[in-house]
Structure formats: C-alpha cells, structure tokens
Amino acid sequence: MTRMPCSSYSQPPEPQAGIGLGTILTIYITCIINGFDVSNVANIQPQLYEAFGHIEFLPWIGLSYSLANFATLAFARNVIDVFNIRYVYIISIAIFFVGATLAGVAGNISTVIAGRAIMGIGGSICQNCAISYFAMYATDSQSPLLYGIMSGLWAIGLVVGGLVGSAFVQSSATTWRWAFFINLPFLGLAIICALIFVPGRPETNNLPLRDHLADIDIL
C-alpha cells in the first residue's frame, strides 16, 4: 500500500475560540522585523564600501535578503504542512537571529551577503507561520483585523528600516553593524514569547523523522 503524505492527514485543528494575545504579539514582532530588514541596508552601503570595498557586490546587500525570502516561500509552506508549526516557527526565528548576528560581525562583504540571505530564509518561514497561525486559530471576526494590522506593521518596518540604518551610520556612537544588531533583542524576545505563548498543531501521526523529511518537496 502506498503511504499517504503527511500533509494529507496532518490537518489544521478545528476552529478555535480565538487566537491568544501572546501569540498575536509574537507574530507582530516578527512581522515588523521582516519589513525592517528589507530596507535597513538602504543607507549603510557607503559605509560598507568604505569598510570592505567591492562596489560590484553592493547591490547584493539588499537583494540577498529579498531573493532568499521569496525563493523560500514555497519550501516554507511545505515544511509547515509536514512538521509541527510551533517548532518550525521557533526555529525560523532562530535562523533569522543567526543571520543577523553573522551579518553584524562580518569581516568581509561576502559574509554580510550570506548573513542577509540567511535572514531572508528565516524571515520567509516566519511570515508563512504567521499567516498560517491566523488561518488556523483566528475566528472569522478576528481575521480581517489581524491580517490588516500584520500588513500595516510590515509596512511600518519597511519605512522605519532606512531611517534607523541611516541614524546608526550618522551617529558617532554606532556603526553600520548596528543595523543588524538591532534585530537581536527583538528576535530574542520573539523566541521567548513563542516558547511561552505560541501553540502547536496537534500531531495526528507518529511517523519517524525520515518519513516526515521524505514528504518535503525541496523544489
């Protein structure tokens, strides 16, 4: 008998009474950070060039985040279908944290680009988890407002990112690295909140890890 893929019987839970405030706040933290990191490098590129040279790589400082984010969307959706969304969400925030740290401590421009790409991957999975949580747990009356606020916060992060990055490079007390380091306390808070507040999807099967991995379509 052919085994059915995990996603065919790991169905979302029955509609809940509503999504918890702690979960909402956690999701909104990651949403605003997601928007922030699209534009936070816009005004720090001259300083990156002064530090590392390689003007030909400067476009990739901005592109690497967005390209990695979009390229991971379908894969992220597939991972959420196969594994418990709570663990996927926490790991994705941790990936974002690692990428921001790597970009902040980078000793060359290639490492900055790599860190940005890792941030994009983590951000893509975070955003997919956020949308999925609202779809699974929010009531019909909650959903429009929650999605609207989520989009608004992402846009606020997008607008604020360039301003904050510019402020860091113009201040004598900070450098361009703080455009990445500023993510860390918020991402750390998001991980703590996710561990405390964010629910998981009830498991409906006990398949071994290798079978779960086999159900992931990397393309």
Image (cartoon, rainbow, N blue to C red):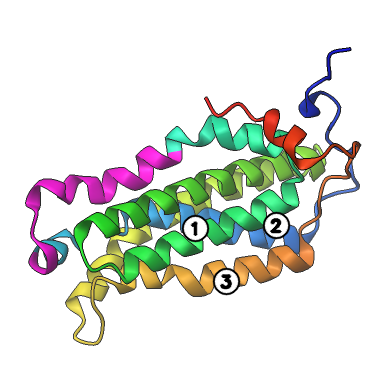
Q: CA distance from mark 3 to mark 2?
A: 16 Å
User: Residue at image x 89%, y 40%?
Assistant: 206
The verdict on residue 214 being magenta is: no
Q: Position of residue 35 (x, y in %)?
A: 44, 52
Q: Position of residue 118 (x, y in %)?
A: 42, 52
Please, what secondary structure does the residue beneath circle 3 have? helix
User: Residue at image x 36%, y 47%?
Assistant: 65
* 112 and 156: which is toward the camera: 112
Looking at the image, tell me whether mark 3 or mark 1 is earlier in sequence order.
Answer: 1
The verdict on residue 59 being magenta is: yes
Q: How many marks?
A: 3
Looking at the image, tell me whether mark 2 or mark 1 is earlier in sequence order.
Answer: 2
178 relative position to 57: left or right: right
Q: Quadrant of residue 127?
A: top right
132 relative position to 208: left or right: left
Q: CA distance from mark 2 to mark 1?
A: 19 Å
Q: Which residue is mark 1?
A: 96
14 relative position to 29: left or right: right
Q: Position of residue 75 (x, y in %)?
A: 56, 33
Residue type highlighted by circle 2: Ile
Q: Which residue is mark 3?
A: 188
**How many C-alpha atoms fall within 10 Å of the one at disc 2: few (<14), some, or many (≥20)?**
some
Q: Which residues are magenta?
A: 50-69
Q: Position of residue 6 (x, y in %)?
A: 79, 29
Please, what secondary structure does the residue beneath circle 2 have? helix
Residue type highlighted by circle 3: Gly
Q: Which residue is mark 2?
A: 24
